[in-house]
Image: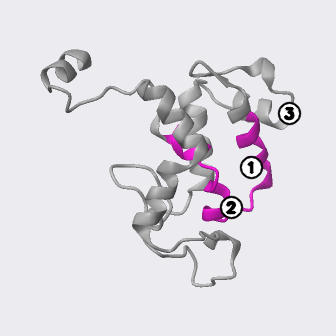
């Protein structure tokens, strides 16, 4: 059905073959620095999961870290998409960095901090403050660019 809609749209709709939108956020190399997370366990899990992704799936045999395997085993109905969404949620818990719903949190496109205390780790350290430049950096990130190149062929 989706393909027939795309066919009728005369090139205005492109179907992307990807795990989920959150995967692009998860591979973004500046995610940890920008969101300011101090969750070292989740940072390690993110690294392990990203290194194990093959053909839209997490290859569990490539994961040696026990905590990562326990994290994945904690899902009632395991799927690669659920793991990706959950991990992104760990890094973007604050609504200002959120990627849930129809709009991204304002810190993705504005100069902002998620705390009144700028020295707080949750503020993160984006090296750019201009919102459009942040979105440009997200889309031009080497890892994100690799994924997009694969998706669009």
Residue 33: give its label.
none
Kindly identify which residue carries mark 1: 43
Question: Which residue is depicted at the point 79% across and 54% down?
Answer: 40
Alpha carbons under labels 2 and 1: distance apart: 8 Å
Kindly identify which residue carries mark 2: 37
Q: Secondary structure at mark 1?
A: helix
| Mark 2 touches mark 1? (CB < 8 Å) | yes
Mark 3 burial class by Cα count in 10 Å: few <14, some 14-19, many 20+? few
Q: Earlier in the sequence, mark 1 or mark 3?
A: 1
| SS majority, magenta | helix
The correct choice, above or below, for 119 with respect to 69 in the image is below
Query: Foreground: 23 or 117?
Result: 23
The correct choice, above or below, for 87 with respect to 66 in the image is below
Residue 65: give its label.
3
As for residue 23 lying within the magenta part, the answer is: yes
**Whole-percent x and y of residue 119?**
69, 82
Question: Which residue is depicted at the point 70% across and 42% down?
Answer: 46
Asked if residue 109 shows in the view, the reply is: no
Question: Which residue is depicted at the point 63% across and 82% down?
Answer: 118
Q: Is residue 84 left or right of residue 135?
A: right
Alpha carbons under labels 3 and 2: distance apart: 20 Å
The picture quadrant where one finds residue 44 is top right
| Mark 1 touches mark 3? (CB < 8 Å) | no
Q: Secondary structure at mark 3?
A: loop
């Amino acid at each position: 059905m989706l393909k027939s809609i795309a066919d009728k749209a005369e090139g205005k709709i492109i179907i992307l073959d990807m795990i989920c939108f959150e995967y692009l956020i998860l591979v973004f190399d500046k995610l940890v620095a920008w969101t300011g997370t101090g969750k070292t366990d989740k940072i390690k899990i993110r690294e392990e999961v990203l290194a194990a992704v093959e053909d839209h799936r997490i290859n569990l045999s490539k994961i040696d870290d026990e905590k990562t395997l326990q994290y994945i085993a904690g899902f009632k109905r395991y799927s690669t998409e659920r793991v990706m969404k959950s991990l992104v949620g760990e890094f973007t818990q604050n609504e200002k960095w959120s990627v849930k719903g129809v709009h991204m949190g304002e810190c993705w496109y504005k100069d902002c901090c998620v705390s009144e205390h700028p020295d707080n780790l949750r503020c993160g350290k984006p090296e750019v403050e201009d919102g459009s430049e942040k979105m440009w950096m997200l889309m031009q990130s080497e890892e994100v660019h690799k994924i997009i190149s694969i998706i669009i062929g």
